[in-house]
Image (spheres, rainbow, N blue to C red):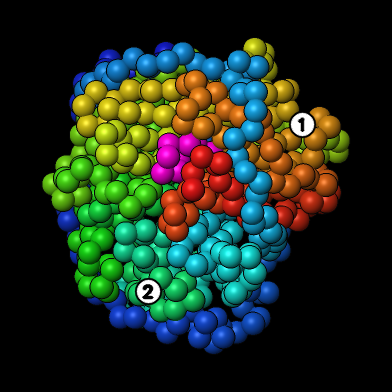
């Protein structure tokens, strides 16, 4: 990958005037209307059983970290957010003296390894089902008892028989993963998406985002299918790496990290696209409105609506990004306001946070997480915020929660690492950090987290754990809404590891998912990778649900 100019000092956009690198709108497009597919059960039954088995073994998805040296200098003018409302809590000071989360109700095995790495572990609960999509395979579970209802099946089974749209062939024939599972809680519909392209066009594109929207609350039913071609504001083809999707009242908001191609070429910066939600829910032709944020910024997450209370009328979707210096140090985040209805994107707001150093700064967030011998060092992906950017409207306040991986306080080299998490408030006026913490209760590494908030304001955080004598496993912690700011309860175990990962090119996770159950808006579900036994490309995944005692 070609490296761009080195940026000295912290990348404060307030120091640079707006330029051709500033966010610009791409001309509005409209995707073709979609007809309903056969049911997913029928599609899965019609797919040849040998199709997935034909996939080459030992596939490693390329790592595309975004470093300060890759970023351009020029940025939009920036406004300054509010100073943090509370001090950072870390180490022993961040641990609450008792437990506040009831026992785990569901704790089952998810989809196992299929010779790809990393697994891109992702999933979400619906009305009665839980859908997990791990790299190239998806499965549907009964939410009541964790029983498997369908699958695992190749992810592109969703697009079997798809025609009538540019990109239909790519969505139907390719199965490259980077999936996201969402459940639109207000509409009671599933949104399932992954990227795709013709394998013969890997070096050149075109590249697509393949999107399936269910016609009912039943994930095994039929879907409307769409293919969105990725282009820059200038109309050039681009590769849409690390796509993430947020649900918002007027649009499904898609972000991705643009590169010239899937294998090489310059970093082009993040892109946000809004896809007209009302049209997609009926299979109609949705309007698509996109903005390129420019190559001065790193990967961006869209806000994702939790709960049944919608944002205030006309509220924009919120976008957030991590920023750091060449030595990995940083002291702020960026926030934008994206309005699909208004077709506008604000200038970024700089959100001050407690100083941090990204996880594994020596490789800009790459591999430094230690396992017991003979395990290889594991990727931290410390260069970006971790999925999701969870939004909730409590009526008297709006809040966002998000996390990323950092060096533990006092760490002098790469690792051990911990999870830095934030709650932001005053989103429509002068946004700022209400509370923040670094979760690192001991010298073992905790990273690749995902965070969510229930209807009472309790916060749950799930993550991977590993150390010199701890096999890679899955744990979680939580903060009751009555607790002092920045503190979390004693952690609990979802599943312990039983071995180490070797010779898998250091790949781990890429992301995980803490999501909120729409039934009652109290139970939270977490899915993550772990290592059950020593080996290559033999990861396992876990699905667990938990709830706070105070939310019933």
In the rendering, at what x and y percent does residue 201 appear? 45, 64
Mark 2, mark 1: which one is toward the viewer? 2
> Is 145 placed above or below 160 here?
above
Q: Nearer the viewer, residue 6 or 223?
A: 223
The residue beneath circle 1 is 467
Q: Mark 2 points at which residue?
A: 216
Which residue is outermost to the right? 373
Determine the residue positioned at 86% across, 38% down: 374
- Say which element carries label 2: loop
Looking at the picture, how far across and down is residue 271, in whole percent? 32, 45
Of the numbered discs 2 and 1, the one sitting upstream in the chain is 2
Span shown in magenta = 451-460
Q: What residue appears at the point 65 percent right and 49 percent down from the top-left corner?
A: 104
Number of other residues with Cα within 10 Å of mark 1, as a class: few under 14, some 14 to 19, many 20 or more: some
From the viewer's perspective, is residue 264 above or below residue 214?
Answer: above
Q: In this view, does 172 lie to the left or right of 132?
A: left
């Amino acid at each position: 990958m070609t490296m761009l100019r080195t940026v000295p000092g912290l990348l404060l956009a307030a120091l640079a005037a707006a330029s051709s690198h500033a966010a610009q709108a791409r001309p509005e497009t409209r995707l073709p209307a979609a007809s309903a597919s056969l049911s997913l059960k029928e599609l899965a039954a019609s797919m040849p059983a040998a199709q997935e088995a034909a996939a080459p073994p030992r596939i490693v998805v390329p790592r595309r970290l975004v470093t300060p040296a890759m970023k351009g200098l020029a940025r939009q003018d920036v406004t300054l957010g509010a100073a943090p409302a509370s001090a950072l809590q870390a180490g022993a000071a961040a641990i609450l003296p008792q437990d506040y989360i009831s026992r785990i109700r569901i704790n089952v095995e998810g989809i196992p390894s299929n010779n790809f790495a990393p697994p891109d572990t992702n999933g979400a609960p619906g009305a009665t089902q839980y859908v997990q999509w791990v790299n190239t395979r998806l499965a549907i579970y009964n939410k009541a008892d964790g029983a498997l209802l369908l699958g695992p099946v190749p992810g592109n089974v969703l697009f079997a028989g798809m025609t009538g749209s540019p990109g239909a062939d790519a969505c139907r024939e390719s199965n490259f993963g980077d999936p996201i599972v969402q459940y639109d809680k207000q509409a009671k519909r599933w949104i399932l998406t992954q990227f795709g392209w013709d394998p013969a066009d890997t070096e050149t594109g075109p590249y697509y985002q393949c999107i399936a929207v269910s016609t009912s609350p039943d994930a095994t039913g039929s879907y409307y299918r769409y293919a969105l071609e990725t282009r820059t504001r200038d109309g050039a083809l681009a590769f849409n790496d690390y796509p993430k999707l947020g649900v918002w009242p007027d649009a499904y908001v898609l972000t991705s990290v643009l590169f010239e191609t899937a294998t090489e070429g310059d970093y082009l910066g993040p892109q946000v696209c809004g896809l007209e939600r009302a049209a997609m829910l009926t299979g109609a032709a949705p309007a698509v409105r996109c903005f390129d944020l420019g190559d001065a910024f790193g990967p961006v997450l869209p806000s994702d609506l939790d709960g049944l209370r919608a944002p205030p009328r006309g509220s924009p979707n919120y976008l957030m990004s991590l920023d750091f210096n060449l030595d990995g140090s940083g002291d702020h985040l960026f926030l934008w306001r994206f309005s699909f209805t208004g077709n506008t994107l604000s200038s970024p707001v700089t959100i001050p946070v407690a100083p941090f150093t990204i996880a594994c700064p020596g490789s800009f967030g790459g591999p430094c997480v230690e396992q017991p011998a003979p395990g290889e060092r594991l990727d931290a992906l410390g260069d970006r915020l971790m999925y999701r950017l969870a939004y909730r409207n409590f009526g008297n306040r709006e809040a966002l929660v998000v996390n990323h991986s950092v060096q533990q306080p006092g760490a002098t080299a790469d690792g051990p690492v911990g999870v830095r998490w934030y709650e932001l408030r005053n989103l429509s006026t002068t946004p700022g950090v209400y509370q923040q913490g670094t979760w690192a209760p001991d010298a073992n590494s905790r990273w690749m987290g995902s965070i969510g908030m229930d209807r009472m304001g309790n916060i749950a955080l799930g993550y991977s754990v590993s150390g010199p004598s701890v096999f890679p496993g899955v744990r979680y912690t939580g903060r009751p809404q009555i607790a002092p700011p920045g503190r979390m309860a004693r952690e609990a175990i979802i599943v312990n590891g039983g071995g180490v990962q070797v010779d898998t090119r250091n790949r781990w996770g890429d992301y995980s998912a803490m999501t909120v159950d729409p039934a009652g808006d109290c139970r939270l579900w977490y899915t993550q990778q772990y290592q059950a036994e020593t080996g290559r490309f033999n990861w396992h995944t876990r699905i667990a649900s938990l709830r706070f005692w105070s939310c019933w």
